[in-house]
Image (cartoon, rainbow, N blue to C red):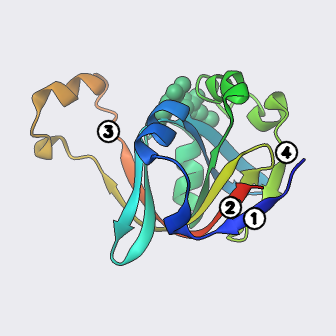
Amino acid sequence: MKAFREIKPVDIPGNPVHRIGQEWMLVTAGTPEHFNTMTASWGAMGELWFNPVCFCFVRPQRYTYEFMQRNEAFTLSFFDERYRPQLNFCGSRSGRETDKAMECGFTPCKAANGSVYFDEASLVIECRTIYFHDIDPANILDPSILKHYPQRDFHRMFVGEITRAMEKV
Ligand SMILES: Cc1cc2nc3c(=O)[nH]c(=O)nc-3n(C[C@H](O)[C@H](O)[C@H](O)COP(=O)(O)O)c2cc1C
C-alpha cells in the first residue's frame, strides 16, 4: 500500500462539490477498538470561525450517529472509483449488523486525532468536532426540502475543524 503525505487543508485536491456529492466519502467515528463508518454524499468543506472545516450531515437513526455523538473527532475518507462497490455497501448496510470495514477489506488506521481512517483511501481528512446542530424544520425556507424527511428524521450537522489532511503519494 502506498504511503500518505500530509497536505495543508488549503491544498486539498479536487472540487468539494464533486468530491463529496459525486465521489462520496466514508464518515468514520470512534476508536480503533470500537468505530463505525458510513457512506455520505451530503456535506461541505470551507472555512468557519477562521478554521478550515468540514460539515457532514448524519440522520439520527444511523449507527454512526452514536459514534459521532460520543467522540470528539471523526474522519472523512475518499476513495478511487474502483472502491464504488464498497462505498455502496457502507451506504446500505448498518454497522449494527455487520463489520463493514472487514467486509470491504478496508484496513483501519489510527488517526492523529484518535479516530480511524482507512489505508485504502486516496484522501483522508481528520476533524475535531467543534459544533453540531440539528436541522430545524421551522427554518426550512424551501418546502420541497421536506420531501427528504417523510419520517421527520432531520439530520444533525456536525462541523469538524480540519486537524490533518493527507493524500496518497
Ligand atoms: C451515496 C450515499 C450517500 C449517503 N449519504 C448520507 C448522508 O450524507 N447522511 C446520512 O445520514 N446518510 C447517508 N447515507 C446513508 C447511510 O450511509 C446508510 O444509511 C448506512 O447504512 C448507515 O450505516 P450505519 O447505520 O452503520 O451508520 C448515504 C448512502 C449512500 C449510498
* Vertical relation: 25 (above or below) 2: above
Q: Earlier in the sequence, mark 4 or mark 1?
A: 1
Disc 1 designates what residue? 5
Question: x, y (%) of residue 112?
Answer: 72, 71
Disc 4 designates what residue? 107
Amino acid marked by disc 4? Thr
Residue at the spot 38% in from the left edge and 61% down from the top edge: 46
Residue at the spot 52% in from the left edge and 48% down from the top edge: 14
Amino acid marked by disc 2? Met
Q: Residues within 10 Å of mark 1 (few under 14, many from 20)?
A: few
Q: Residues within 10 Å of mark 3 (few under 14, many from 20)?
A: some
* Mark nearer the viewer, 2 or 3: 2
CA separation in Å, label 4 and label 2: 16 Å
Residue with the most extreme bottom position: 50
The local secondary structure at tag 3 comes to: loop
* Mark nearer the viewer, 4 or 1: 1
* Vertical relation: 35 (above or below) 159: above
Tell me whether the residue at label 2 lies in contact with that at label 1, contact meaning CB atoms closer than 8 angstroms.
yes
CA separation in Å, label 2 and label 3: 31 Å
Left or right of 165? Residue 159 is: left
Q: Is residue 162 visible?
A: yes
Disc 2 designates what residue? 166
Disc 3 designates what residue? 154
* Vertical relation: 35 (above or below) 84: below
The local secondary structure at tag 1 comes to: strand
Amino acid marked by disc 1? Arg
